[in-house]
Image (tube, rainbow, N blue to C red):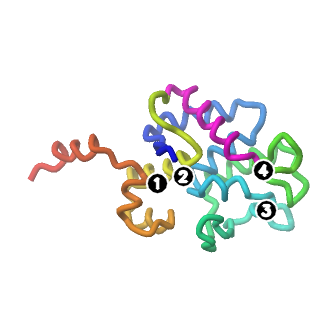
Amino acid sequence: MNIVEPIRDPKKILAIKRNLREEKDPRNYLLFVAGVNLALRISDLLSLKVKDILDRQGNLNEFIHLKEQKTNRQVKIKINETVKEALNYYLSKARVTDPEQYLFKSQRGNKPLDRIRAWGLIQKWTKEVGLEGERFGTHTLRKTWGYQARKQGVSIEKINEKLGHKSVIVTKRYIGITQEEINLLEDEICI
């Protein structure tokens, strides 16, 4: 298995969002925004259906409830304002009537987008904003959430809990704390 990187530069995240917002298909915009905000594994993200985000009256749910495929852990994930905006945009553009429809539908019937196609999309999006030379893939979305949360001051313990890792050591390695960042501490911490 290849190790992939998070998107570290917030400007690159915004550039990808801008590019995707201009595309004809709103699915890709929602995929990226939900991916970097919900911190779900790609298998769980791609398995989401309309019924997971809308109540019976057609209103957005406050939370997504799901059983993680990898861990069998039941999770309750708050839908933040950024994801709500992306969902509203998607729902205003897409023809969504069936609660059993996948949010990230393949172009071949009511099947979810597969992880290989999602990988290809992420490769394309990162290259379009000049992120070349680093390794990006489906796990990039989840790792980006963890990395950006840490950069915004969220404790490593809370990130660990959100990602469901067994230890903080795994989380530190997972979110890509680099030697370069550690070296910068020499300049920041002067006692």
Residue 112's disc is: 4
The Cα–Cα distance between marks 1 and 2, rounded to whole angstroms, is 7 Å
What residue is rendered at 86% in x and 60% in y? 99
Q: Nearer the viewer, mark 4 or mark 2?
A: 4
Tell me the mark number nearer the camera, choosing from 3 and 4: 4
Q: Spatial distance from mark 3 to mark 2, Cα to Cα?
A: 23 Å
Q: Which residue is mark 1?
A: 146
Which of discs 3 and 1 lies nearer the camera? The answer is 1
Q: Which residue is mark 3?
A: 54
Whole-percent x and y of residue 70? 61, 64
Tell me the element at label 3: loop
Q: How many marks?
A: 4
- Asked if the residue under mark 1 is in contact with the one under mark 4, i.e. CB atoms within 8 Å, the reply is no
Depicted 72 relative to depicted 59: above or below? below
Image quadrant assignment for residue 48:
bottom right
Q: CA distance from mark 4 to mark 2?
A: 18 Å
Given this view, does label 4 or label 1 mark the residue nearer the observer? 4
Q: Earlier in the sequence, mark 4 or mark 1?
A: 4
Q: Position of residue 3 (x, y in %)?
A: 47, 45
